[in-house]
Image (cartoon, grey):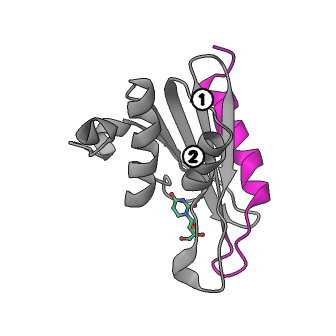
């Protein structure tokens, strides 16, 4: 694989520059690393109708699936923070909806990716299956 933990976190950091977050001012970047070495990123996209906001992880999943990409998702890096303070504070852990979105990709490729949630003091490392145990997925509909 061509990405590493550090490079995936760096990719998430760079992706956060694309955040459209005029309401919360909280910028998030996500980077998804695949077994073939590819990386797909996303940033959060807010909306004047606040509840329609798309998180960075969901944007990344939408990008990759709508581009026809598939693969074995091995790791995910997420970083967030107010403008100019990216990566400060507690580790950013994917929200419930994003866990489900990531799980779809993981199940398609048959993996249980490591999720790196970047914080100021620590990078929380946790399996997606621990963030979303007993996940509903494609197999349920087969
Ligand atoms: N957000 C993400 O993009 N990903 C997460 O994992 C947590 C929250 C975004 C949504 C919203 O634009 C902003 O962070 C504040 O909630």
Label 2: few (<14), some (14–19) or many (≥20) C-alpha neighbours in 10 Å? many
SS at mark 1 in the image: strand
Residue 72: x, y in percent? 50, 23
Considering only order in the chain, which callout, 1 or 2, is on the residue closer to the N terminus? 1
Label 1: few (<14), some (14–19) or many (≥20) C-alpha neighbours in 10 Å? many
Q: Nearer the viewer, mark 2 or mark 1?
A: 2
Of the pair 138 and 38, the residue shown nearer to us:
138
What residue span does the magenta drawing correspond to? 1-26
On the rendered image, what quadrant is the N terminus found in? Answer: top right
Q: Is residue 9 above or below residue 62?
A: above
Residue 41: name its quadrant. Answer: top right
Residue 18: x, y in percent? 78, 58
Q: Which residue is mark 1?
A: 33
Number of numbered callouts drawn: 2
Q: Is residue 43 above or below residue 25?
A: above
Q: Which residue is mark 2?
A: 61
| Residue 4 included in the magenta stretch of the image | yes
């Amino acid at each position: 694989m061509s990405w590493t933990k550090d490079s995936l976190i760096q990719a998430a950091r760079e992706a956060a520059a694309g955040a459209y977050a005029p309401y919360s001012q909280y910028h998030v970047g996500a980077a998804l690393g695949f077994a073939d070495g590819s990386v797909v990123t996303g940033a959060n996209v807010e909306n004047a109708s606040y509840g329609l906001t798309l998180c960075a992880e969901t944007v990344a999943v939408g990008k990759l699936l709508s581009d026809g990409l598939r693969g074995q998702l091995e790791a995910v890096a997420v970083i967030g923070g107010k403008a100019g303070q990216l990566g400060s504070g507690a580790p950013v852990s994917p929200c419930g909806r994003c866990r489900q979105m990531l799980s779809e990709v993981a199940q398609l490729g048959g993996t249980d990716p490591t999720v790196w949630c970047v914080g100021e003091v620590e990078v929380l490392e946790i399996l997606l299956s621990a963030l979303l145990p007993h996940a509903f997925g494609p197999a349920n509909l087969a």
